[in-house]
Image (cartoon, grey):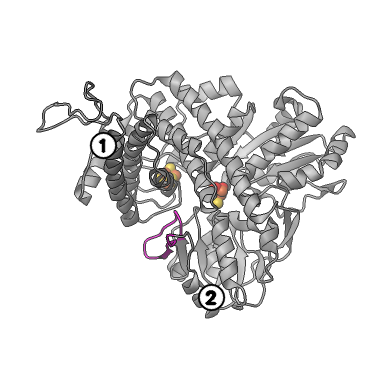
C-alpha cells in the first residue's frame, strides 16, 4: 500500500504497511481500486454530459464513493468492494445510454489484439482509458488490479502530486456535497466539474500547468460547494447564533452523535424526543448546538469530549451508544465496540451500520433502545464553551467589530480554522492561542478549535476572542466575514485586511478549504503542523511563489512574523 493523503502520513512521506489511521493493506487496496473505477465512471459521465446525458444516480454515486475513501471514514473492505462492483455496473449502464445519445465511449482490446470497437459515432474510433474499460468480478481480480492503479502508478512525482492534490480536493468537496444533498440541495454544475476533474487525473496529455489550473478551478467549486452547504444548513435549521454549550453531563442515559451530518442529528433528535434519552454532540457535531431548530429540544444536552482523536478514551466513559455520521473514526476498543454505530459514508467492520431508506429517512430505534439500558455518561469535565459565530451572527455584530478595529481595540484577526490531530506538535496551536497579543481575535471553524476553545481567552469590548463559526465547511463563513470587512473598510484586496491565516490541516476537507481560499485570492496562508506529504518539492515551490504558502516554525517567531505582516 501507499497512501499520503493526510497529515499523519507515516514519516511525513506516506503509509506503506498500515495506515497511522488504522487502514490495513487490504482496505487500502479496496480504496485504491474504488478511486480508480470511480474515475472510470467519471470519464463516461463526462463524455455523457457532452451529449446531454446527465445521470443523478451516477453523480450521487461518484460523490459517495469519494467520501467513502476520505481519511478515517470507512474501514469496511466488504462495503468498499461492494461499491466497486456497483460502480462497474453503473458505468456499463451509463455507457449504453451515452452511446444511444450519440456519445463516444469505445473500448480497446478484443482477443488480446488492439482492435478498436466502434461505438457511437460511426466514423470515429475511440480509445477509452483503461479505467473506463477494465472490469473484474472476484476479490482476486480486484486485489491484482488495485496493486497497479494506486497513487504510485503515476511515475512523474510532480504530475502525481498535482493529480492527488486535485483528487483530495474533490474528496473534500464530495463530503460537503453529500451533506447538502441529504438536505435536498444540489448543484449539477458541481457534479459536472467533479466528473471532468476526476477524468482529467487520468489524462496523460495534461501537463503541470493544466493541472495547476484545474486545482485552482477545484477551489472555485469548493467555494460553490461550501456556499451550497451553508444554504442547505441555514435553510433547514436557521442561522447559527451565539450559544453557550454545556460540556458537563446530565443524569439520563444518552446517545453521543459525532461527525458532520446535520440531517442525521435532526432525525436522531426527533426520534429520541420523549424517550428519556438525551442527545450529546461530539467533536465536529458541536456545531449542531448553534442552530435554532435544534436548540428547541429539551433533551438536546451539551457537548461531550473533544476532537476526534481522543475518542477511544472518551467513548469508553460515555457509557451509552455512539453514532458516527462521517469521519473521523478511530479503530474502536473492545470496551465500546458494541456501542459504536455508523451511518452514511462511515463504516467499521463489526459495528452496526444504519442504512437510509429510499426516502433518506433512517431508523435509529436500535440505538435508542440500547441507550435506555445504559448508564448515564461519566462526567469528564464541567463548564461551558461559546460558539455560533457564523457569518449571519458576526455580520449582525459588524458595527461593533468595525468600531473595535477602527479604535485599535482589535489589532488583528487570526484565522485558525481546520483540523485537530494526535501529533504532539499540534500543541503549538494551544501555545499560539495563549501567546498572541490580547488585542487580537481568533476566527475558527473545524475541529482545530479544541486546541484552544476551553482556554477562556476573554473578550474585547463584549466580542469573544475566539469566534467559532462551526464545522470545517463553515470556513465559508470566515470568508464571507472577511469579504464584508474588505467592503466596509473600502479595500481593493482581501489581503490588505489585518487577517493572518494559520491553518491546521489533517484530512481532505482541509484540502478543498485551502484550494477555495487560494481561488478567492487569499495569500500567505500558513499550514501546519507539517506541509502535505503529497506536495512534491516543485509543486510546493509553485504554491510558495504564487501564493506565499508557508509552514509553521515556533510560536514566538510566527507571532512576530504575523504581527509585522
Ligand atoms: Fe475534524 Fe475530522 Fe471536520 Fe475533518 S472531525 S479532522 O473530518 O472535517 O475537521
Ligand atoms: Fe496514512 Fe493518512 Fe493514508 Fe491513513 S489516510 S493511510 S494515516 S496517509
Q: Quadrant of residue 560?
A: top right
Q: Residue at x 55, y 64 (%)?
A: 267
The residue beneath circle 2 is 371
Q: Nearer the viewer, residue 450 or 106?
A: 106
Foreground label between 2 and 1: 2
The secondary structure that dominates the magenta segment is: loop
Q: Nearer the viewer, residue 314 or 375?
A: 375
Q: Position of residue 183 (x, y in %)?
A: 55, 53
Q: Nearer the viewer, residue 209 or 304?
A: 209
Q: Position of residue 187 (x, y in %)?
A: 52, 40
Query: Quadrant for ligand 2?
Result: top left
- Whether 310 is drawn above or below 160: the answer is below
Q: Quadrant of the N terminus?
A: top left
The region drawn magenta spans 343-358
Q: Quadrant of the C terminus?
A: top right
Q: Residue at x 32, y 26 (%)?
A: 155
Q: Is residue 422 visible?
A: no
Q: Is residue 81 visible?
A: yes
Q: Position of residue 404 (x, y in %)?
A: 86, 38
Q: Position of residue 150 (x, y in %)?
A: 32, 37
- Whether 411 is drawn above or below 537: the answer is below
**Judging from the image, what secondary structure is the residue with disc 2 in?**
helix
**Judging from the image, what secondary structure is the residue with disc 1 in?**
helix
- Whether 157 is drawn above or below 168: the answer is above
The residue beneath circle 1 is 148
Inspect the magenta stretch and tell me whether residue 346 lies in it: yes
Decide: few, some or many residues near mark 2? Use Cα within 10 Å; few <14, some 14-19, many ≥20.
many
- Whether 392 is drawn above or below 101: the answer is below
Q: Quadrant of residue 262?
A: bottom right
Inspect the magenta stretch and tell me whether residue 303 lies in it: no
Amino acid at each position: 500500500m501507499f497512501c499520503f493523503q493526510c497529515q499523519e502520513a507515516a514519516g511525513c512521506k506516506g503509509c506503506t504497511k498500515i495506515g497511522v489511521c488504522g487502514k490495513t493493506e487490504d482496505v487500502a487496496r479496496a480504496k485504491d481500486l474504488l478511486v480508480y473505477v470511480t474515475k472510470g465512471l467519471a470519464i463516461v459521465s463526462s463524455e455523457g454530459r457532452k451529449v446531454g446525458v446527465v445521470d443523478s444516480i451516477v453523480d450521487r454515486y461518484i460523490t459517495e464513493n469519494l467520501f467513502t475513501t476520505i481519511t478515517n471514514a470507512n474501514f469496511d473492505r466488504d462495503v468498499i468492494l461492494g461499491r466497486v462492483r456497483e460502480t462497474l455496473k453503473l458505468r456499463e449502464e451509463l455507457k449504453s445510454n451515452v452511446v444511444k445519445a450519440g456519445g463516444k465511449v469505445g473500448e480497446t482490446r478484443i482477443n488480446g489484439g488492439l482492435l478498436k470497437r466502434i461505438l457511437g459515432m460511426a466514423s470515429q474510433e475511440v480509445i477509452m482509458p483503461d479505467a473506463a474499460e477494465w472490469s473484474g468480478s472476484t476479490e482476486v481480480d480486484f486485489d491484482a488490479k488495485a496493486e497497479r492503479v494506486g497513487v504510485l502508478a503515476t511515475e512523474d512525482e510532480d504530475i502525481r502530486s498535482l493529480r492527488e492534490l486535485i483528487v483530495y480536493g474533490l474528496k473534500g468537496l464530495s463530503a460537503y456535497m453529500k451533506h447538502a444533498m441529504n438536505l435536498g440541495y444540489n448543484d449539477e454544475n458541481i457534479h459536472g466539474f467533479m466528473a471532468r476533474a476526476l477524468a482529467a487525473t487520468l489524462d496523460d496529455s495534461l501537463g503541470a500547468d493544466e493541472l495547476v489550473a484545474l486545482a485552482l478551478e477545484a477551489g472555485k467549486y469548493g467555494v460553490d460547494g461550501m456556499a451550497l452547504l451553508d444554504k442547505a444548513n441555514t435553510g433547514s435549521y436557521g442561522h447559527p447564533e451565539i450559544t453557550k454549550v454545556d460540556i458537563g453531563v446530565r443524569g439520563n442515559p444518552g446517545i453521543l452523535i459525532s461527525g458532520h451530518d446535520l440531517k442525521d442529528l435532526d432525525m436522531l433528535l426527533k426520534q429520541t424526543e420523549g424517550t428519556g434519552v438525551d442527545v450529546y454532540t461530539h467533536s465536529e457535531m458541536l456545531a449542531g448546538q448553534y442552530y435554532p431548530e435544534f436548540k428547541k429540544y429539551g433533551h438536546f444536552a451539551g457537548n461531550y469530549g473533544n476532537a476526534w482523536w481522543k475518542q477511544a478514551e472518551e467513548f469508553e466513559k460515555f457509557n451509552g451508544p455512539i453514532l458516527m455520521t462521517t469521519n473521523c473514526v478511530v479503530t474502536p476498543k473492545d470496551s465500546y465496540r458494541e456501542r459504536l454505530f455508523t451511518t452514511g459514508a462511515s463504516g467499521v467492520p463489526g459495528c452496526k451500520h444504519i442504512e437510509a431508506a429510499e426516502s433518506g429517512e433512517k431508523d435509529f430505534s436500535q440505538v435508542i433502545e440500547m441507550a435506555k439500558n445504559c448508564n448515564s455518561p461519566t462526567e469528564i469535565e464541567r463548564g461551558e464553551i461559546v460558539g455560533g459565530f457564523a457569518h449571519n451572527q458576526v455580520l449582525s455584530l459588524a458595527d461593533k467589530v468595525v468600531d473595535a478595529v477602527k479604535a485599535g481595540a482589535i489589532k488583528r484577526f487570526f484565522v485558525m480554522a481546520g483540523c485537530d490531530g494526535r501529533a504532539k506538535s499540534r500543541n503549538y496551536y494551544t501555545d499560539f492561542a495563549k501567546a498572541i497579543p490580547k488585542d487580537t481575535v481568533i476566527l475558527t471553524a473545524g475541529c482545530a478549535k479544541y486546541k484552544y476553545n476551553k482556554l477562556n481567552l476573554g473578550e474585547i469590548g463584549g466580542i469573544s476572542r475566539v469566534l467559532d463559526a462551526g464545522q470545517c465547511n463553515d470556513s465559508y463563513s470566515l470568508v464571507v466575514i472577511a469579504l464584508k470587512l474588505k467592503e466596509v473598510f473600502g479595500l481593493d484586496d482581501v489581503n490588505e485586511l489585518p487577517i493572518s491565516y494559520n491553518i491546521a490541516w489533517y484530512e481532505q476537507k482541509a484540502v478543498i478549504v485551502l484550494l477555495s481560499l487560494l481561488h478567492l485570492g487569499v495569500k500567505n496562508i500558513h499550514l501546519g503542523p507539517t506541509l502535505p506529504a503529497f506536495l512534491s518539492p516543485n509543486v510546493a515551490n509553485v504554491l510558495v511563489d504564487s501564493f506565499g504558502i508557508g509552514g509553521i516554525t515556533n510560536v514566538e517567531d510566527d507571532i512576530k512574523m504575523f504581527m509585522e505582516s
